[in-house]
Image (cartoon, rainbow, N blue to C red):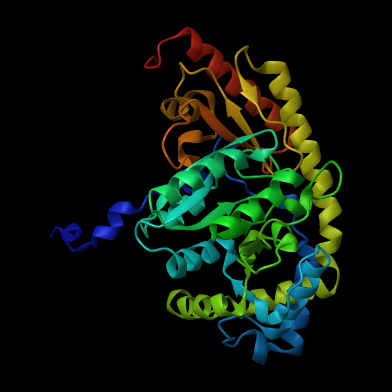
């Protein structure tokens, strides 16, 4: 029986995540620079075990029960305090707890995007956001980046053209600090200008902020939400990088009139975020586990970033360029135009035993064939050095041989 004929037309817009596909190679003899997977040694397992024991001993009747769709009230209050220390003024009523920030992207796309709406995105940008938005059929337009982040001057030009064409600009999606996939942070002046443009052209700003907790040099830049004076910025963050991704807890901060629709949408998607995971995060915040994690994480990932940059300097052939991130988990690689990093991936996995994510996955308007995202978060330092050596060999060999050679 041909079951495919029953599928909706919407499924044609779905794309498998290359990152999720690459996760299948973890545990083989391939060194993966693919997914932004936290270092397992960073998980505070002892603290979490104590928290779980306490929760299940003292209030199992609550922690194992259904919870409100918007989240456990105590956690929402604690998250508001946690964000307050980062300059974000919010009350519990402005917070919805989600199953990671990926669910928050899906919920926002569901309530905000009509077919044909213009959504601006950094180019390249997080491929999970592209996946979440695409199915609602917006017109996704990319804005290039340089060393100071998104080119807001280019954005302004595109906004003017969109207005002249009568297009409806609904939102811009940005990762302003330690951006995924490039590791670049948006400069202070550009943050202010972006918010000015949002006011002038009347659109929303969706700020995704998973990586600002570990900026390696200097202070973390202020979140866009902390500069927001009109409620235009919708802020997303997650416990996946600072505690453990297996908890699947994130949060969304916005004005109440938007959150009402987010909650209604969530009722149809997941009903609620895991109650037990919410109580674990609540206690991790109350007991200072998260705050103790942050300097530890910065130390771990800084040493790994340094190892990757040193190996790139040592092994990469002439003509290859890369970013030098001030934090986060990623380096963005650009090889000579003659190479196609998507076409090379199978050879990288099979012959060179190294994985990366081809850059085309992160581009909203095509392009990026000669780019790749490298993550330094998961492998040990020596494995990072070896992976870069192997990748450099792949690139060097490919520059000397036809692309189809095996």
* Residue at image location 59% in from the left, 80% down from the top: 70
- Relative placement, left or right, of 32 versus 242 is left
* Residue at image location 18% in from the left, 64% down from the top: 6
Q: Quadrant of residue 115?
A: bottom left
* Residue at image location 68% in from the left, 43% down from the top: 329
Outermost residue toward the bottom in this view: 61
- Relative placement, left or right, of 303 versus 116 is right
Q: Quadrant of residue 150?
A: top right
> x, y percentage for residue 136?
37, 60
Outermost residue toward the top in this view: 400
- Relative placement, left or right, of 62 versus 69 is right
> x, y percentage for residue 109?
46, 63
Of residues 398 and 158, the one drawn nearer to the viewer in this rendering: 158
Residue 232 showing in the rendered view: yes
- Count of numbered circles on the image: 0
User: Is 15 drawn above or below residue 333 in the view shown?
Assistant: below
User: Is 237 drawn above or below residue 368 in the view shown?
Assistant: below
Which quadrant does the N terminus fall into? bottom left
- Relative placement, left or right, of 339 versus 97 is left
Outermost residue toward the front in this view: 164
Which quadrant does the C terminus fall into? top left
Outermost residue toward the left in this view: 1
> x, y percentage for residue 404?
37, 17
Residue 26 showing in the rendered view: no
Q: Quadrant of residue 235?
A: bottom right
> x, y percentage for residue 126?
54, 47
* Residue at image location 54% in from the left, 61% down from the top: 202
């Amino acid at each position: 029986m041909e079951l495919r004929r029953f599928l909706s037309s919407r499924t044609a817009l779905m794309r498998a995540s290359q990152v999720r596909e690459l996760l299948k190679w973890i545990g083989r003899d391939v060194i993966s620079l693919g997914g932004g997977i936290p270092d397992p040694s960073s998980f505070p397992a002892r603290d979490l075990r104590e928290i779980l024991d306490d929760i299940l001993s003292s209030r199992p009747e609550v922690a194992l029960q259904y919870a409100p769709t918007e989240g456990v009230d105590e956690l929402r209050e604690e998250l508001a305090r946690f964000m307050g220390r980062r300059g974000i003024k919010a009350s519990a009523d402005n917070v919805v707890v989600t199953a990671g920030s990926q669910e928050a992207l899906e919920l926002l796309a569901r309530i905000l995007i009509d077919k044909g709406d213009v959504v601006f995105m950094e180019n390249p940008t997080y491929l999970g956001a592209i996946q979440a938005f695409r199915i609602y059929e917006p017109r996704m337009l990319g804005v290039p980046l340089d060393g100071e982040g998104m080119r807001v001057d280019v954005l302004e030009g595109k906004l003017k053209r969109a207005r002249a064409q009568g297009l409806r600009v609904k939102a811009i999606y940005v990762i302003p600090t330690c951006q995924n996939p490039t590791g670049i942070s948006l400069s202070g002046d550009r943050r202010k200008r972006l918010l000015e443009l949002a006011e002038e052209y009347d659109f929303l700003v969706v700020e995704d902020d998973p990586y600002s907790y570990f900026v390696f040099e200097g202070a973390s830049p202020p979140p866009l939400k902390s500069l927001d004076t009109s409620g235009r910025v919708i802020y997303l963050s997650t416990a996946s990088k600072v505690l453990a991704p297996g908890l699947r807890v994130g949060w969304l901060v916005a004005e109440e009139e938007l959150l009402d629709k987010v909650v209604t949408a969530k009722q149809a998607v997941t009903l609620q975020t895991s109650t037990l995971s919410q109580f674990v995060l609540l206690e991790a915040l109350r007991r200072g586990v998260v705050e103790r994690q942050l300097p530890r994480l910065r130390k771990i990932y800084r040493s790994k970033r340094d190892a990757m940059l040193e190996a790139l300097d040592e092994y990469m052939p002439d003509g290859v360029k890369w970013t030098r991130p001030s934090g986060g988990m990623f380096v963005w690689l650009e090889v000579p135009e003659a190479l196609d990093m998507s076409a090379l991936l199978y050879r990288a996995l099979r012959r060179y035993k190294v994985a990366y994510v081809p850059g085309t996955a992160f581009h909203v308007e095509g392009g990026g064939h000669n780019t790749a995202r490298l993550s330094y978060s998961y492998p040990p330092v020596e494995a990072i050095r070896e992976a870069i050596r192997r990748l450099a060999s792949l690139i060097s060999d490919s520059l000397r041989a036809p692309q189809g050679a095996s």
